Image: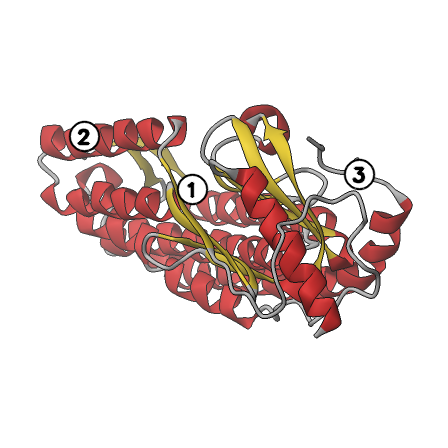
C-alpha cells in the first residue's frame, strides 16, 4: 500500500504554478462580489437610518422576542466586518488549496454566499423595523430567516458555475512500472463499479436534521421545517456515492448526481491504495479538501482509492475493493497512452 505524496515535493511545487494564478483570479472577483453585497446592505442601512429606531433589534430569543439591540450603523459595520473575515477565510482556502477546480468553485461560492447572507440578514431584520420608535415591538418571522439562508445560495451557485474548470492536462510519462495493473487483452473491455455510503458523517447528519426539526416544532415556526429538509437533501448528496472505473477513467458521483468528478484516464499518473483517517487527513467526512489541496470523498476511515493525476492534483475515495479499482485504472491509463 502507498500513502499520498507529502506536500511540498518538487512535482507539486512546479504544478502549483499551473493552477495558482487561476485560483487568485477566482478568489479576487468572488471576494469583490461578496464585499459588494455587504456594502450594498450598508448603503441600505444609511438610507433607512432616519426611519429606524435609535436602537434596532439585532438578536431574537427562541420565542421570537427581541433580546439584543444596537445602533443601525453598528449592525452595518458588523455585517461588513464579518463578510471581510469570511471572504478572507474562503479566499485563503482557494489560493492555498485550490489545485482542483472543485475546490476553487467551493471557495468562490463561499465568498459570494458570505456577502449575500450578511446582506440578507441585515436588510431582512431592518425592513420590519422601519417606522417604529421602539424596536422591542418588532416580530421576526421564520420566513424572513429562511429567505436569508436560502436566497444567498442563488448567487453562490452562479459564482461556482462561473469558475472555469481545469484544462486538459494529459500525462506525458508512462504509468510507473511498479504500479499495480489488471491484466487485459487487447481490445478487452472491463468496468469496476461500487457504491460508497454511510459512515459517521451520516449519523451526524441525521442528528442535525432531527434537532432542527425539533426546534421548528417547539418554536411553532413551521416554515422553518424547510431547514431540516434542506439539510436532509444536503447530507444525501454528501454520503452516498457511485464509484466507477472504465476505459474513460474514474467517475465519482453522489446519489443525486451532484457533486461529482471525473478523472480522465489520460490524466492518471498513478492509482494506488491508501489508508485514510478522516479527521487527521481531511478534517472530517464528506466531500473534503485537505490542507495540501488533495480532494477526497471521505465517508469512513480505512481503505481508499488514491488517484494521483497531472497538475499536482490528487483524488481519494473511501471504497471497498480499492486494490482492484487501482489496478484497472492503471491499466486503462496505460491503454490511453497507447491510444
Mark earlier in primary sequence (3, 2): 3
In front: label 3 or label 1: 3
* Disc ID at residue 109: none
Give the image quarter of residue 323. Answer: top right
Nearest the eye: 6 or 144: 6
Asked if one can make out residue 100 in the rendered structure from this viewpoint, the answer is no
- Image vertical order of residue 299 relative to residue 156, above or below: above
The residue wearing badge 3 is 7
Foreground: disc 2 or disc 1: 2
Residue 190: % across, % down: 50, 59
Horizontal and vertical percent position of residue 191: 47, 57
Q: Residue at x 24, y 44 (%)?
A: 227
- Can you tell which mark lies on residue 71? 1
Could you tell me which quadrant the N terminus lies in?
Answer: top right
Which residue is label 2 attached to? 215
How many numbered circles does the render carry? 3
- Front residue (pair 184, 304): 184
Farthest bottom residue in view = 339
- Give the image location of residue 330, x and y in percent: 67, 53
- Alpha-carbon span between mark 3 and mark 1: 48 Å
- Looking at the image, which residue is at 34% across and 27% down? 204
Q: 323 or 101, which lies in front?
A: 323
Mark pair 3, 2: CA separation: 43 Å
Which residue is situated farthest in the front direction here? 185
Amino acid at each position: 500500500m502507498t500513502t499520498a505524496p507529502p506536500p511540498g515535493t518538487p512535482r507539486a511545487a512546479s504544478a502549483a504554478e499551473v493552477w495558482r494564478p487561476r485560483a487568485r483570479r477566482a478568489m479576487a472577483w468572488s471576494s469583490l462580489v461578496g464585499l459588494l453585497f455587504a456594502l450594498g446592505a450598508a448603503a441600505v442601512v444609511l438610507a433607512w437610518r432616519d426611519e429606524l429606531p435609535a436602537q434596532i433589534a439585532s438578536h431574537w430569543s427562541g420565542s421570537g422576542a427581541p433580546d439584543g439591540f444596537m445602533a443601525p450603523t453598528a449592525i452595518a459595520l458588523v455585517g461588513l466586518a464579518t463578510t471581510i473575515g469570511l471572504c478572507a477565510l474562503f479566499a485563503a482556502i482557494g489560493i492555498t488549496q485550490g489545485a482542483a477546480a472543485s475546490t476553487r468553485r467551493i471557495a468562490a461560492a463561499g465568498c459570494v454566499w458570505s456577502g449575500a447572507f450578511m446582506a440578507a440578514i441585515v436588510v431582512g431584520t431592518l425592513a420590519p423595523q422601519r417606522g417604529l420608535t421602539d424596536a422591542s415591538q418588532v416580530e421576526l418571522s421564520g420566513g424572513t430567516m429562511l429567505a436569508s439562508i436560502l436566497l444567498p445560495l442563488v448567487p453562490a451557485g452562479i459564482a461556482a458555475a462561473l469558475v472555469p474548470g481545469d484544462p486538459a492536462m494529459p500525462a506525458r510519462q508512462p504509468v510507473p512500472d511498479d504500479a499495480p495493473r489488471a491484466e487485459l487483452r487487447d481490445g478487452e473491455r472491463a468496468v469496476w463499479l461500487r457504491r460508497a455510503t454511510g459512515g459517521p458523517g451520516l449519523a451526524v447528519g441525521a442528528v442535525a436534521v432531527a434537532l432542527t426539526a425539533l426546534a421548528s416544532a417547539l418554536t411553532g415556526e413551521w416554515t422553518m421545517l424547510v431547514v431540516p429538509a434542506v439539510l436532509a437533501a444536503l447530507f444525501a448528496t454528501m454520503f452516498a456515492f457511485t464509484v466507477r472505473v472504465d476505459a474513460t477513467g474514474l467517475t465519482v458521483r453522489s446519489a443525486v448526481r451532484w457533486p461529482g468528478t471525473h478523472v480522465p484516464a489520460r490524466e492518471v499518473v498513478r492509482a494506488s491504495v491508501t489508508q485514510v483517517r478522516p479527521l487527521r487527513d481531511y478534517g472530517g467526512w464528506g466531500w473534503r479538501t485537505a490542507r495540501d489541496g488533495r480532494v477526497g470523498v471521505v465517508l469512513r476511515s480505512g481503505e481508499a482509492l488514491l488517484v494521483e493525476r497531472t497538475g499536482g492534483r490528487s483524488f481519494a475515495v473511501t471504497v471497498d475493493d480499492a486494490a482492484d479499482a487501482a489496478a484497472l485504472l492503471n491499466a486503462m491509463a496505460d491503454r490511453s497512452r497507447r491510444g
